[in-house]
Amino acid sequence: MSDAPILQVDTLSRHFPVRNMLGWKTGAVRALDGVSFEVRSGETLGIVGESGCGKSTLGKALVGIHPPGGGRIVFEGKDITGQSANERRAVAPKLQYCYQDPGNSLDPRWTVRRSLAEPLVVHTALTPSDRNARIAKIMQQVGLPLTHLDLYPHELSGGQQRRVGLARILTLHPRLVVLDEPTSGLDVSVQASVLMLLRELQRAFSLTYLFISHDLSVVRMMCDRVAVMYLGRIVELAPTETLFAAAKHPYSQSLLSAIPDIGGRRVTDTFTLEGEPPDPARPPSGCRFRTRCPRAAPVCAETDPALRPITPAQSAACVFA
Amino acid sequence: MALPGDNLLEVEDLRVSFATESGVAKVLDGVNLTIRPGEIMGLVGESGCGKTTLANAILGILARNARHEAGTIRFGGEDLLAMPRRRIEDEVRGRRITFIPQDPYGSFNPLFPIGTQTMEVMKWKSPHRAAGEGRGVAGFFSRYPRARRRSDAAAVSQMLRAVQIPDRDAAFVKLPHEFSGGQRQRLMIALALLPQPQLVIADEPTTALDVTIQVQILKLLKQLAKKSGVSVLFTTHDLGTAYEICDRITVMYAGQEVETAPVDDFFRRPHHPYTVRLLESLPRPGRELREIGGEIPGLISPPAGCRFHPRCARATDVCRAERPPVAALGGGHEVRCYHPIAEATPA
Ligand SMILES: Nc1ncnc2c1ncn2[C@@H]1O[C@H](COP(=O)(O)OP(=O)(O)OP(=O)(O)O)[C@@H](O)[C@H]1O
Ligand SMILES: Nc1ncnc2c1ncn2[C@@H]1O[C@H](COP(=O)(O)OP(=O)(O)OP(=O)(O)O)[C@@H](O)[C@H]1O
Ligand code: SF4
Ligand SMILES: [Mg+2]
Ligand SMILES: [Mg+2]
């Protein structure tokens, strides 16, 4: 890992229209609302937060699956925000997104072989025999037997589908991979092997990961730094161990206090956070967390705290941090 | 071992199979499970091990292609599998045994307000409904006596307060989609407790929820269950959740229960090789992950003997030949293994 940023994100936003039953636009969900951060080459940056806070929207905006509404994305020193489709082709293979649900992102009518060949056909000029060689190599690297090349997605287990999803991306030799919930829906024993595989691959291909997950135990194990999101914003960004030892934002503190501690005190006896996230189309004024925040004061309804450094390594967006 | 009279539910040597296109899947292979009054019993295991099948068997709602091969399910001393269907529907399912499903979205009719749906349930499943009431020709005109309707409505309102639904009068006329996922799960808990059952079966009730909401729901369920003294069968694949809420835990692997123990003993001194490896595959700070290796077996031609043997480092010939008997280790800790791990690393 080096300190040089591979990716710089500046006040990125993305709004989705809210429509009523007649199809009229009645408002907007600010799925991403001014998100800024950097990713260093070779690191694993975790993105955590509750359902609907904008994690997938962020990941998809970064790799260009849907363009951001505003802000700037700089990849390897180059502004890629407003690139034409042609310019985009050069960076596309280097920036890859690994879908939340591999079962649905693999075409059910395609064999594993076809799913793996397709990105190579689109993005490279390899000859068929070179393609086959690369496919065989990647199958071995993700720990799948070559006999599985002729199987269809429904004939694979959940863990094997993830491996195919990863193989599909890695054949392109990307630099940065957005892993969207790479282990959700997997059993713990399968999760363990997928996580171990992700680490091995990171080493073998010197990959940079953006690791989206709602499972903080997994994030703690995998990530160098963690960004905590709430309703379209980053509320805290810190090195993993700093965050777990001394989170500064009340929302991060609540999230951390919800992690079960097997053998220790029961979280159900100590957890205090009340309520649920508000409707993202109508966020509260001021700090968006104030409706659930145990420390909220009148000032929180008036000022909208920006993410600011508390120490050189740790930033938080709270008036009291 | 506890005396049979102490148990509310006793599942003994239950065998259930499913007819499928590629053969007969032997999904429950001699499962044993007991639940005492007032106890929260955790049924833990990985996807496909048979948790839902066992829950459905107890509720008497197995799929059409299911076959009950052997075994008994005794509830309050009576064999549910031998009970006439009519009695199960009238007295047991939805009344003495109720259900909280994994997916609260699919369990409500999207077209009717929550109040209407709740009262429809109470009409048949209210704890104050007399047996047979509202059935037959005479019952048609007196389906829901006014006095009972009024007292049921009061009970519903009280229960909505207990599960922390804000603005209860407004909640009555709202449609299911107007509630958040967490609120819908609270409503399911209310519906399950309203008939004042003896047993609630909760099949992974929090897996679809966010962590902070998940803790809130677990806390609520635990409080309400303890307050009303109801027993709960809580199925989950998440060991952390089981640690939070359960009094005892049974682990199932590929349709066989392998280890049962009181919760603290379970996590401190696991003895079955599968349980130990399962705990080692949990991400924990300061410890390296270990994978179990191998895969969960198919159930159409499952491994003979102990179904874990193909993945077990301790397996010997006897493991491959015959399923190990129950060994009682004292303190209610039971394990089914020929070579249990004596001094397991504490979890
Ligand atoms: N294509 C879309 N059209 C309209 N709204 C959308 C769209 N995609 C996402 N949203 C909304 O934007 C918000 C953020 O969604 P997003 O999928 O990024 O959340 P997430 O953090 O990935 O959640 P999860 O943990 O459930 O995957 C949500 O309120 C969602 O409803
Ligand atoms: N109606 C059915 N027909 C055929 N096979 C079935 C049927 N229902 C379940 N099975 C099989 O029985 C096994 C156990 O399924 P079950 O749903 O009980 O598992 P589970 O432990 O609840 O898993 P999960 O954690 O994924 O919910 C699985 O292999 C499943 O495919
Ligand atoms: S009975 Fe044998 S195969 Fe089964 S868990 Fe014990 S040692 Fe392993
Ligand atoms: Mg997402
Ligand atoms: Mg299930």
Image: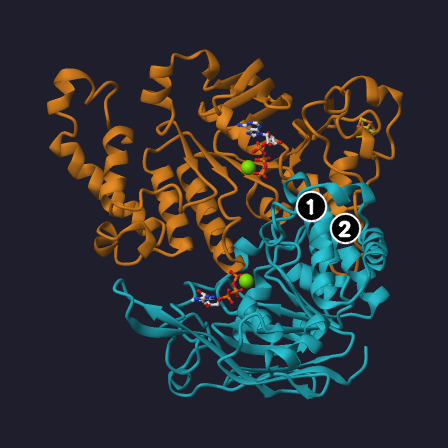
Chain colours: A cyan, B orange
Residue placed farthest to the front in the image? A127
Residue A312 percent across, percent down from the top left: 69, 88
In space, the residues marked 1 and 2 are separated at their CA atoms by: 23 Å
Near-viewer residue (A217 or B113): B113
Residue at numbered disc 1: A111
Mark 2 surroundings: few (<14), some (14-19) or many (≥20) residues within 10 A: many
Mark 1 Cα-neighbour bin, 10 Å: few <14, some 14–19, many ≥20: some
Report x, y in % for residue A18.
35, 69
Q: Position of residue B184 (x, y in %)?
A: 38, 50
Of residues A179 and B343, the one drawn nearer to the viewer in this rendering: A179
Q: Nearer the viewer, residue B134 or A128?
A: A128
- Please report the residue visible at 79 percent of the width from the left and 56 percent of the height from the top: A197
Quadrant of the rendered image containing residue A255: bottom right
Secondary structure beneath dot 1 equals: loop
- In terms of image quarters, where does ligand 4 lie? bottom right
Helix, strand or loop at label 2? It is helix
User: Does residue A145 appear anywhere in the picture?
Assistant: no
Q: To which residue does mark 2 refer?
A: A193
Seen from the viewer's position, the closer of residues A308 and A175 is A175
Q: Is residue A91 left or right of residue A185?
A: right
Say if B3 sits above or below A82 in the image: above
> Which is in the foreground here, disc 1 or disc 2?
1
Residue at image position (76%, 24%) is B303
Give, as a three-letter code, the residue at label 1: Thr
| Residue B7, numbered label | none
Residue B249, given in percent of the width and then of the height, sits at 62, 36
Image quadrant where residue A260 sits: bottom right
Res B130 seen here: yes
